[in-house]
Amino acid sequence: MKRSPRRALLAVGTVALALVASVGVRFVAHADTAPTVKAAAVFAHPGVMLSRAQLDFVKGKVNAGAQPWLGAYNQMLASKYASLSRTPAPRAVVECGSYSNPNNGCTDEREDAIAAYTDALAWYITGNAAYAQKSIALMDAWSASITSHTNSNAPLQTGWAGSVWPRAAEIIKYTYSSWPNQARFATMLRNVYLPTVIAGSSSNGNWELSMMEAAVGISVFLDDRTSYDRAITRFRARAAAYIYIAADGSQPKYPPVGSVDTPSELISYWQGQSTFVDGLAQETCRDFVHTGYGISAISHVAETTRIQGGDLYPELQDRLRHALGFHTKFENGTAVPSNICGGTVTKGLGPISEVAYNALHNRLGIAMSNTQIYTEAKRPQGTNNLFVAWETLTHADNPA
C-alpha cells in the first residue's frame, strides 16, 4: 500500500500519541479538529448516554402518563427485549462475516445486549427488581462465556454490542443494590471489546464511529481516562471527516486512517459524489441506513461527552444539524437534485434522530424544521436491533 507524505505524518502522530499516553499527558487533538475539550476529572455515573437526572425525568413522565414517553415505554415493554422469560444465548466465539454471513452468535449478542439495556431501563422506571435481575443475568451469561469476535465484520460487531453493554451496565451498577459478577463483566469489556474498538477502522465511517462509541462508553464504565481521551481524539477526527460542511473548504476532510490520500480517492470513498454541500455524509450515496448508523453514533458520543463535562455538541452542532436536515428533507419527500447521488438515494434513515434533535433544538435552540417533522412523525422511535434503542423514551424533550 502506498503511503503519501500526509499519511507518513499521521503515522508519526500516531506514534507520538502512544508515547504521550504512556506518560499520562493529554494529547492535543488531531490537526483537523478544534483544540482538546477537557472532560471533568472524575467520571459521572450513570453516564453513558444517560445521566441519573435524565433517567429521573423519563421515570417521572412515564409515571405521570405523559406522551410521547408513555407510548414509547409501552412500545419498549411490548418488545421481545423486555421479556422476563428471555434466555440468553452466549458463546465463546462470535463469528460475523460480511452482511452477517456467517452469523454465528452475532444477532444473539446484539439482541441480548439490547435486552439487558431494555431491562435496565424498565428496572429504573418501574422499580421492579425482576428487570434488574434479568439484565444482570444477560450480562453475566456473556461475561462468563465470550472470548473473541472473528471474521470480516468482527470490528463492527464488537462496536455495536460494545456500545450497548455499557449503557445497561452503568444503570445497573449505579442504581441497583447488588451485582456480584460486576468485576467479571468489566473484565470482559476491557479484554474482549476495548482492544478491538479503540484501534479504530479504515473502513466506511460508520464502522469507526460505532467503534469509538463503544470505546467511549466502555471507558466511562471502567473509569479509564486514558482510553476515553484516546477514543475521543479519534472520534473527533472521524466525525469531522464523515459529515461535510462548507467550512471544510472545497472538499471533505480526509479520514484519519487508511489509504485515501488524493481528491480522486476521496471522491471514490464518498461513493462517487463530487459535489459537496452542507450535511452530505460519506455514505449518503451508499444508502441512508448506513449513514444513519454514523449520525447516530456521533450523537451518542456527543451525549456522553455532555454528561461527562467535555461537551462536544458545540463543536459538532453544524455537522449534526446539517446532516439531519439534509437527510430528513429527502425522507420527508423533497425531490433529490441531480447533483446529489445522480438524483437517486436509498432512504431508510431509521430511528436515529431523537438524541441529536433534543440536544440541538431543545437545548441549543437551533431551528430544525425538517428534522422536527421527521422525528415527530416517527415517534415512538424504537430500535434498529443493532445498537439504537428506545430513544423517544430516553431523549425526547429531555431537558436534563
Image (spheres, rainbow, N blue to C red):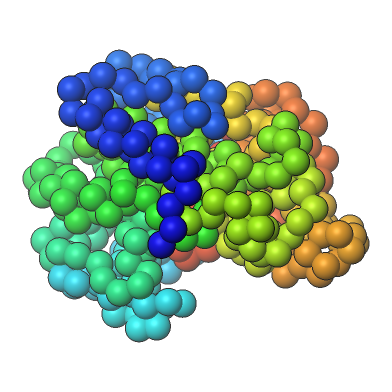
Quadrant showing the N terminus: bottom left
> Which residue lies most toward the bottom here?
102
Position of 233 with respect to 85 (left or right) is right
In this orientation, which residue lies closer to the viewer: 351 or 35?
35
Along the line of sight, the residue nearer the viewer: 199 or 13: 13
Q: Is residue 248 above or below residue 274?
A: above
Q: Is residue 169 left or right of residue 74?
A: left
Residue at the (40%, 22%) spot, across then down: 28
Q: Position of residue 21 (x, y in %)?
A: 24, 28
Looking at the image, which residue is at 30% across and 31% down? 17
Q: Is residue 109 above or below residue 234?
A: below
**Viewer-side residue, 2 vs 132:** 2
The answer to whether residue 394 is seen in the rendering is: no
Seen at 31% across and 46% down, the residue is: 198
Q: Answer whether residue 4 is visible to the viewer in this image.
A: yes
Relative vertical location of residue 223 with respect to residue 389 in this rendering, above or below: above
Of 9 and 136, the residue lying toward us: 9
The residue shown at (26%, 19%) is: 25
Residue 252: x and y, percent?
66, 44
Measuring from the top left, give residue 311's x and y in whole percent: 50, 24
| Residue 306 located left or right of residue 27 | right
Give the percent coordinates (x, y) of residue 3: 43, 52
